[in-house]
């Protein structure tokens, strides 16, 4: 734990966002920060990294969204003690560099979970209804949904799926089967079994050395006829060349995502079987925006007040 001796000093909390928080979120963050006797500074819609490097020079805490915090940013931030990613994913923070600079890195897990889970079903309903092409489609009732990673988002996906009358299965290498079963979800032994069993597989894994490129030809190829792959996790987990090869060979498979692939132009040729949003939008709701921002401010206050590092990700 970082030694925090800040209780008598006013801390400068910088919110640095290329894509700004909603006004209501900024107001909520300001109230939290100022109520704790600290100062809030905003850097919104910046267009050059140099602007961020200048702004972090005297910041004690940093709140970001998808903004990148790498070794260069941390080098410039001489007073920085904590950086909080307002959201669940934190692969935009160089964790090793943060540790080397004695900076605590945190995320705000669960704040965006419902927003992402609802989008899964927005994409999925569109896919089973033929992307609204006016032709006959199918229903989700009675279909088998597989959830890969049973964290905050995965649990919300399971909750909503039950409302559609789907049979829900899950696999998570880090979540015991009994925990999954207790949630009213069928636990399977491995991810191969998940893809073999389910009509739809929804991805919720982080991008790690183990998961990057792991959703590949062999794995997705195990899906039954008419299978649908949904990705609202991370672009990097998809092996794009292999998935393109598989979809070219199997004209029954569909792929929907809210993270536009690098090979988007190639995927576009699978008309009626592929859809991507223009940019990642799982967490793009007013509610998630506000929740994540305020959670980040509260975590920073707890860190300065009590040395609380409950949500630290670079331990």
Image (cartoon, grey):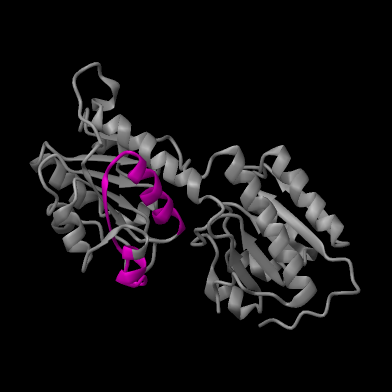
Residue 274 vs residue 122, the one in the foreground: 122
Q: Residue at coordinates 65% horizontally, 45% vertically from top-left?
A: 290
Q: Is residue 135 above or below residue 119?
A: above
Residue 314 vs residue 225, the one in the foreground: 225
Position of the N terminus, as image quadrant, is bottom right
The total of numbered circles placed on residues is: 0
Report the residue that reaches farthest toward the top: 134
Q: In the rendering, at what x and y percent does residue 150 appear?
A: 37, 61
Report the residue that reaches farthest toward the right: 8
Residue 261 in view, yes or no: no
Q: Residue at coordinates 53% horizontally, 50% vertically from top-left?
A: 112
Q: Residue at coordinates 18% horizontally, 55% vertically from top-left?
A: 195
Q: Residue at coordinates 74% horizontally, 69% vertically from top-left?
A: 302
Position of the C terminus, as image quadrant, is bottom right
Q: In the rendering, at what x and y percent does residue 196 appear?
A: 14, 55
Q: Is residue 273 left or right of residue 210?
A: left
Residue 194 in view, yes or no: yes
Q: Is residue 184 left or right of residue 200?
A: right
Q: In the rendering, at what x and y percent does residue 57 appear?
A: 77, 64
* Range of residues picked out in magenta: 152-181
Residue 6 colored in magenta in the image: no
Q: In the rendering, at what x and y percent does residue 204 appear?
A: 37, 55
Residue 177 vs residue 241, the one in the foreground: 177
Residue 171 colored in magenta in the image: yes
């Amino acid at each position: 734990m970082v030694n925090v001796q800040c209780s008598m000093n006013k801390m400068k909390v910088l919110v640095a966002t290329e894509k700004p928080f909603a006004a209501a979120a900024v107001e909520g963050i300001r109230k939290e920060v100022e109520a704790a006797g600290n100062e809030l500074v905003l850097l919104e819609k910046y267009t050059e990294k140099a602007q961020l490097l200048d702004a972090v020079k005297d910041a004690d805490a940093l709140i970001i969204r998808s903004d990148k915090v790498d070794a260069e940013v941390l080098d410039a931030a001489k007073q920085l003690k904590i950086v909080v990613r307002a959201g669940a994913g934190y692969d935009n923070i160089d964790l090793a560099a943060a540790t080397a600079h004695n900076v605590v890195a945190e995320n705000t897990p669960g704040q965006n979970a419902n927003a992402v889970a609802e989008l899964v079903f927005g994409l999925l309903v569109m896919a089973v209804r033929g992307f609204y092409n006016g032709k006959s489609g199918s229903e989700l009732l009675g279909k088998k949904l597989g959830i890969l990673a049973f964290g905050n988002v995965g649990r919300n996906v399971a909750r909503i799926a039950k409302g559609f009358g789907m049979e829900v299965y899950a696999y998570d290498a880090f979540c015991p089967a009994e925990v999954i079963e207790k949630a009213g979800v069928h636990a399977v032994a491995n991810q191969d079994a998940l893809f073999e069993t389910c009509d739809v597989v929804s991805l919720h894994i982080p991008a790690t050395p183990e998961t990057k490129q792991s959703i590949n030809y062999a794995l997705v190829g195990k899906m039954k006829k008419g299978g649908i792959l949904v990705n609202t996790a991370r672009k990097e987990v998809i092996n794009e060349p292999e998935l393109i090869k598989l979809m070219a060979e199997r004209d029954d498979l569909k792929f929907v995502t809210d993270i536009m692939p690098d090979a988007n132009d190639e995927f576009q040729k699978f008309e009626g079987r592929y859809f991507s949003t223009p940019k990642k939008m799982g967490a793009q709701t007013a509610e998630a925006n506000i929740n994540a921002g305020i959670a980040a401010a509260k975590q920073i206050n707890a860190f300065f007040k009590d040395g609380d590092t409950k949500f630290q990700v670079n331990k």
